[in-house]
Amino acid sequence: MTASRAARERKAAAEAGPLARVRIDLGADEQFLYKISCTACTTRKDRPWSAYRPGEDNGFMAAMDRWTFHLVERHPDAEAPCLAYLPAAQERLHARRG
């Protein structure tokens, strides 16, 4: 049985930690789009910083990788379960760039 969207949202929020706000929407192709925003950071337009990137891969792994990099760069003292996957996220980044 597949998890509901609400259950996936709760799981992603737990993985992302207390600084994250997670929302899952459906894309035009009926795939889940993970939108992880930071409760502490804002962009130039005073909007919350977000791991969501229009037109890019916004599945669970891609969004969580971007969120993990944000935590390491902007909130080095933050604790979140997703930080355990930092080495794997870095490997995926190097593979995409390589």
Image (cartoon, rainbow, N blue to C red):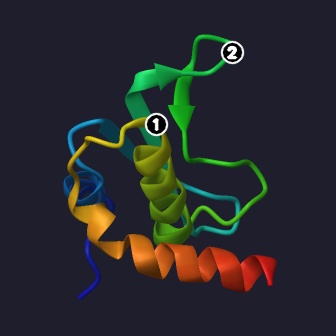
Label disc, if present, on residue 44 of the rendered structure = 2
Quadrant of the rendering where the N terminus is positioned? bottom left
Write the residue at 30% across / 53% down. 16
How far across and down, in percent of the image, does residue 29 sit?
A: 69, 68
Look at the picture and state if 43 lies above or below 56: above
**Amino acid at circle 2:** Arg
Disc 2 vs disc 1: Cβ atoms closer than 8 Å? no
Quadrant of the rendering where the C terminus is positioned? bottom right
- Mark 1 or mark 2, which is nearer the start of the sequence? 2
Crowd rating for badge 1 (residues with CA inside 10 Å; few <14, some 14–19, many 20+) = few
Quadrant for residue 20, please give it: top left
Q: Is residue 10 left or right of residue 58?
A: left
Please state which of residues 60 and 88 is positioned toward the viewer in this rendering.
Answer: 88
Please state which of residues 13 and 85 is positioned toward the viewer in this rendering.
Answer: 85
Write the residue at 42% across / 50% down. 72
Q: Is residue 31 left or right of residue 24?
A: right
Q: Is residue 72 left or right of residue 18?
A: right
Q: How far apart are the two marked residues, 2 and 1, measured between alpha carbons?
A: 15 Å
How far across and down, in percent of the image, does residue 33 sit?
A: 54, 58
Query: Label 1 belongs to which residue?
Result: 74
Please state which of residues 73 and 53 is positioned toward the viewer in this rendering.
Answer: 73
Look at the picture and state if 65 lies above or below 2: above
**Amino acid at circle 1:** Arg
Confirm whether residue 24 shows in the render.
no
Label disc, if present, on residue 53 of the rendered structure = none
How far across and down, in percent of the image, does residue 69 sit?
A: 50, 55
The secondary structure type at the circle numbered 2 is: loop
Write the residue at 67% across / 66% down. 57
Confirm whether residue 42 shows in the render.
yes
